[in-house]
Amino acid sequence: MIIASRTVVPKASSRRRTRRLLSSDNSLPYLLLVPALIALGCILVVPLIYNIWLSFHEYNLLRPARNTFVGFGNYLKVIQDPAHVSSLFLTVRFTAITVLAEVILGTSLALLLNLPFPGNHFVRTLVLVPMLISEVVAGLSWRLIYHTEFGLLNYLIGLFGLSPQVWLGPDLALPSVMIVEIWQHTPFVTLIMLAGLQTVPRELLESSMMDGASRWQRFRYVVLPLITPILLLALVFRTMFTLRVFAPVWVLTGGGPADSTLVIGVDIYRAAFRYYNLGIAATLSIILLAVTLAITLVYMRLLRREALT
Amino acid sequence: MNPSVVRLLEKYLIGLCVIAVILFTVFPLAWIILTSVKPANIAVSYPPRFFFTPTLEHYGLLLSGSGGEVLGKAFINSILTTGISMIVTLLVACPAAYSLSRLKPAGGAAIVVFIIGVRMLPPIVLVVPLFRIFQSWGITDTQTALIIPYVGLSVPLATWMMIGFFLNLPKELEEAAMIDGCGRIKAFWHVILPLAAPGLAATSIFTGLLAWNDLVFSLPLTTVDAVTLPVIASRMRVEEGVLWGQLGAVSTIMIIPVILLTFFVQRHIVQGIASGAVKG
Amino acid sequence: MFRRLFFAAAVSITLGAGGVHAQTLTMLVSSGGSGRTFEAAAKHFSAATGIPVNVIQNPYAEVREKQLLELVGKTGNLDVISVDGTIWMPEVAPFLDPIDEQTTDTKHLIPSMVDLFRADGKLVALPVRIAGWVLIYRKDLFDAAGLKPPTTWEEFRFAARTLTKDGVYGFAPALRQGNYLVVQWIPFLFSHGGQILNKERTAAAFNSPEGIKATQFFVDLVRDGLVPPGATAYEQSDIITAISQGIAAMALTYSPYFLNMNNPKESKVAGKLAIAPSLPRDPATGMTTGRTLISGWGFGVAASSRNKKEAHQFIQFVASDAEQKRLAVENNNAPTASAVYKDPDYLKVFPAAADVQGALASASDRPLVESWTMIEDILARELSAAVTGTKTVKEALDAAEKAVNAAL
């Protein structure tokens, strides 16, 4: 969205003149967009339209004879079913907490790794490892670690004299799943923020140091404003991907115990592939898309305000 | 306090933090890799075993019978689908990003919103429509059937990242090249793209990871000929539970190329994003 | 230019990937013990007939997903279809090629197993592997405590309580929210005289006095600490681990898992296990033994297959007496051919066979209804709430009854 605001803002007249000079062919900008638009059109837009259509139909893949148009029936059904509604709220809560944690941890980690120390390059690669492995493998590895009787985690806390915990039981399942999600995706934020920190001009930091600013003040008033745009980029992408989280939850808890980790990603999977109820799956997906879009727009607002101040 | 003491303390504190972070991030993966060389009867045991005589039996089981052939095929398929997806994504995303960042067509903002917006649909609901389309084209169980969704899902992020990157390149270079008689395409090819190399590396990594680790599409869309490594890994979830040793073995095979690649291009990735997306 | 490149690449890949043997049969099987068994069966078949069979092992849930996508799409990519008893029957039956009972011999197969694969009176698959839930126990611990395998639920509870000590728990159940939890609970329900649905399969029947008693008993095992504390996150595999690692004394699980638990390479308690001749019962119901859950794998032929003749030949081969015996002896398959249970070669490798057959003699499967998957998820959710204590048994069963009736 950063780009979006850029492209529409009219630039100085000299810039415009250059542009005219450069674009000898008026159709070129559009020609260059054609491959991307065709690719997205075929691969994403056609299924999107199909899903919008599905969301207005009672549609079960296994019983094609009974498929009928139901108007907003599916939407009403979803809104009136407390299981779907609570999964939506749970997803938003899950996303808010994990993304916040990822951003805080990721930024701190980036600040740490931005310091010069021996083996820095090697450590940076190691720290990226969790984001390089597949979510299913990550989830399964953590299941082995969380195992109440044979897991590594209970063994480790036992060394400190703590009693074993049921990590995937009713009280801890949600935080345990969140930890896996945070573990796996903090590196994405770290990577982006590391890049952001490269852009902070050294002279600026040095001059503020001369002014006697404390370390925190330097971060708060010099570094943070400069890296806010990229922070928001990380936020948008992490939010978008976390709202549809599926694999780690499915592998670790299957949505349980007692639906305490039933996020909308699991709900959609169930509707689509356990019940083959494509109408409901499509409806849930369109709602998820709307929520994602709404949150992104809020971020954009925040971003513009940040950019102005 | 003596400033040099403070500096020393700080040094140790940083060292400690770094070690803690490494333990937390690497340990779960190290554990599964360790499991791949553990004898089966202690893979899951209490207390967990850190020291044992390593065994290659799980790798042996994985390669036994037709396993070696299947795994080899999956490895080649993974490399092919990932590689081609990366290239095609760049070929599609770069011109679009170039146009949106440099030529600024009318309606560019709307196009950007559109490109990101369509990506917000959860991939899982793309499976059934794509399956039907591919089936009517007769391309299920081919690498093409995987490359198409991977490209589609990667183009939005790739375009966004590349827009930021192009915005950041000095315009003068391109103008100079054009004055020297290069066409726009030629200038793009000879001047812009080489400069954009770190950005391309960063973008490719994200595309590559998506394709390399994907299971949402590879499971339903492949059967025999086009299976990829994640599909093989998922087969280690058997009725009796998880074959931890063999899962560890497949995971190790999957992760090594990625870690090696990341190690070598990591600097470029950071640089690429730094000079690219940030400025966007 | 880019598009052309892309398509050129795509076309070359597609062409390169083609060229499968026209006669090859392709099928998906659930990975693990049954997958390995059927891979062996395919080899035997190919050796006998020269028809290659491509057996692909996938995780259970993915086999179901993928088969249905291919069947609904009539792709013809799959020839032989795996059917997990009555759970998958309503979904796949419409897409299967009926088996002609005039020309196909089914008399040698266990009749109740054959019945699992009948839809609207038509036989659509042949049973090839039994999945029955049996009570597996630590004979050494039972003997040391002077206990006998329980025949009533009170004896079961007493044994569990007696053996829960020194880091060992009386019973290891799979209580993670999902299919595992439901199939763990069903034998308790059945053996207390309960039913899942009414006879007409139009309404829930588990919220009866028997059902409440069974569920309360089930939940109390957890509340009283007779199961490992982590059991609320267990799947079936964790039961195998718990028994193999010696932290549990009893398990009520799928019979072939006995072989994993008794395998010296993977288990610390190999040779110390036994299978109870029948499940415990509730004497108040007048039942003479408990009633367990039975299901099994059947093979059918996809109506969209291009190699129907060969596919029928294959499923008949796998269900034959000779192949059932061979798979039972060499691959630990639980046979569907009655004669194998009396076969000396089989009894030699699996002396517990008689007990298994005894335990399965009075058994039934889940009700055959279209919406079973949904019912199972509802039960999993509510039972999970009951075993973790977020709801009382009564609350959970009331909620489940309401939701199941709505789903029906």
Image (cartoon, grey):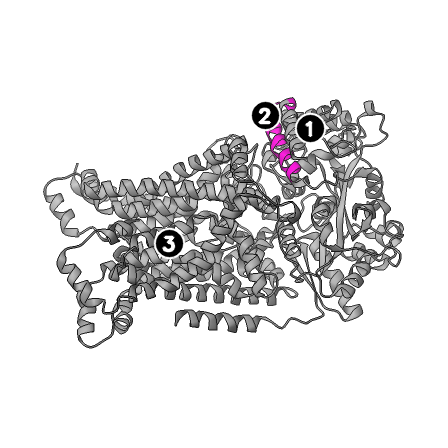
Q: Residue at x 71, y 24 (%)?
A: C212
Q: Nearer the viewer, residue C323 or B174?
A: B174
Q: Which residue is mark 3?
A: B115
Amino acid type indicated by mark 3: Ile
Read off the chain for label 2: C
* Residue extending furthest toward the left: A211
Question: Is A111 left, or right, of B127 in this rendering?
Answer: left
Question: What span is colored magenta in the figure?
Answer: C374-394
Packing grade of label 1 (10 A; few <14, some 14-19, many >=20) is many
Residue A186 can be seen, yes or no = no
Q: In the image, residue A281 lies at what x, y percent?
A: 54, 44
Question: Is C342 left, or right, of A83 in this rendering?
Answer: right
Q: Which mark is residue C389?
A: 2
Q: Which residue is mark 1?
A: C218
Q: Are marks 3 and 2 on the same chain?
A: no
Q: In the image, residue C206 lies at what x, y percent?
A: 72, 28
Q: Secondary structure at mark 1?
A: helix
Quadrant (top left/top right/bottom left/bottom right) for the N terminus of chain C: bottom left
Amino acid type indicated by mark 2: Gly
Which of the marked residues, 2 or 1, is nearer the chain's N terminus? Answer: 1
